[in-house]
Amino acid sequence: MKLKTLSIVVVILFLASAAVFIANRPAKLAGVDPRIGHALVDHSVLAKATKITLEDAGKSVVIARNPAGDWIIDNYYGFPADFSKLTQFADQLSKAKIDRFVTTDPARIARYDFGHDSISLADASGKTLWSLDLGKTLDSGGRLVRYHGEKKVFLSRLQLWMDSSAKNWADSTLVSLKLDDIAGIGIEFPGSSTLELTRTKKGAPFEIQGPAQAGRTLDPQKVDALLTSITTLRFSDTDALNAPAVAQAAKNSRWVDLRTFSGAHWRLTFSRKVPEPKPAPKAKNGKATPPASTTPATSLPVFLNVKCSDPKAAVNQMMTQRAFQIYDYAYRALPKTADALMVAPKPAPAHPAAPIPPAVAKPESKPAKS
C-alpha cells in the first residue's frame, strides 16, 4: 500500500472513531453545582464579617469585632478574644473546599445529624453574609455540610474544632510581662511585713531597699524563679464578684507589686481561703475521738486581682466584671518570708575537739622494807 493511501486510511479511521465517541459519550450531568472544587466560603465574605456565631449542641459562642476594632467574646462579658485561636479557626475555614455533591434525598439527609452544629458570619449591620449547617463526620474523612436554607448536601474536608464553651474562646491572659522589663518588686509576706527590691538596668541583679537583712544576700536564682511564676498569669475560671468563695478568700490575701522600666505599675493580689479543720467524727464505743483533719489547701481556689497603672489596659475593666481564679502554682511559689529569697547562710565551722591530754604515768611503788 502506498504511503499516501495509508495516510488517507488513518485519517478516515480517526474521523470514524471521533464520530462514535461523540455519539456515545455520556450526556453532561444535569444540576452539577458550580461550587464544587471551590472554597467553602469566599475570602471576601470573611473579610467583611464582623460577627461569628458558632452553634454546637444547643450552646453558642458569639465572637464580634467592637467599634475599636478589637475582637471580643460577645456572650462572655465582652472579654478579649483569644486572637491566636480565632486566627486558626478562620484559617481552617478559609482553606476548606467543597469536595463533592452527596445528595438531596430527605431520607438520607435525615441520617446525617444536621440541626445541631452551625457557623454563621454577619456584617456590622447584623446582616447574615454566610451560614453553614454541619452534619456528621464520616469515617473516611471529611464532614457533611449544607448551606443554610438549601437542600443540597456536600462533602468537605473541613476540620474545625467546634468549641462550644464561650469562656474557652476568651483570651485568658491576665498578666504578660518580660522578666528583663521588671525594674522593681514589692512583696507582702504573711503578717504584713514587706520587702522592696530594685535594680538600675536590665540584666542587673536586684538589690534590697531599706534596712538590709543583717548578714543576708539576695539569691538571684530565687528572685528569677519568683518572677518566672508571676509575670505570666492566666485565669482558669471566673466567679461572680459577690460569690461566697471570693469573699472567704479575700480574708487571706497578699500582694506583689511589679514595676517596669517604662514606668508601668502592676499590683497582683493573691487570695485563698485558709483551710478549715474538718469536724472530728463522733466517738464510738467509748473510744477516744481521733484528731480533726484539715481540708487540703490544694482543693481551695486561688483568686487573683490585677490593677495596672495604664488606664487603657483591658484587665482593669475585666476586674470590675468578674473574680478570676488562677492555677495555684503561682500562689505556691510566693515566698513566705524574706529569708526564702536570700542565699542560705553558711553553716558555722565546727570547733575542733579539744586534744585529749596524755596520760600521766604513775610512779612505781617501792616494795616495803621488812
Image: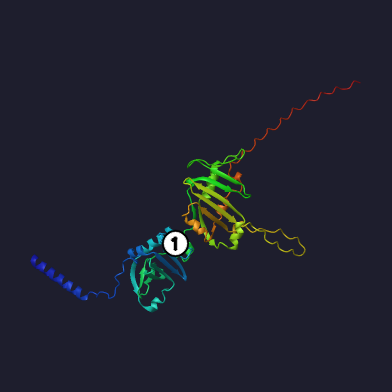
Q: Toward the viewer: 213 or 264?
A: 264
The location of residue 27, given as percent across then percent down, is 24, 75
Residue 2 in view of the camera: no
Q: Toward the viewer: 87 or 141?
A: 87
Q: Name the residue under label 1.
A: 72
* Quadrant hosting residue 147: bottom left
Mark 1 Cα-neighbour bin, 10 Å: few <14, some 14–19, many ≥20: many
Residue at left 47%, top 55%?
A: 313
Question: Which residue is situated farthest in the right direction here?
Answer: 370
Left or right of 135 in this view: 242: right
Residue at left 52%, top 45%?
A: 184
The type of colouring in the image is rainbow
> In the rendered view, would you say 149 is above or below 187?
below
Question: Which residue is situated farthest in the bottom direction here?
Answer: 107
Count all numbered tags in the image, as a single digit.
1
Question: Which residue is situated farthest in the top direction here?
Answer: 369
The location of residue 283, given as percent across then percent down, is 74, 63
Left or right of 81 in this view: 272: right
Question: Which residue is situated farthest in the front direction here?
Answer: 311
Left or right of 347 in this view: 39: left
Residue at left 33%, top 68%?
A: 99
Q: Toward the viewer: 69 or 219?
A: 69
The location of residue 207, given as percent across then percent down, is 54, 41
Element type at mark 1:
strand
Residue 61 in view of the camera: yes
Quadrant for the N terminus in the image? bottom left
The location of residue 169, given as percent across then percent down, is 46, 62
Q: Which amino acid does label 1 sit on?
A: Ile
Quadrant for the C terminus in the image? top right
> In the rendered view, would you say 172 is above or below 358?
below
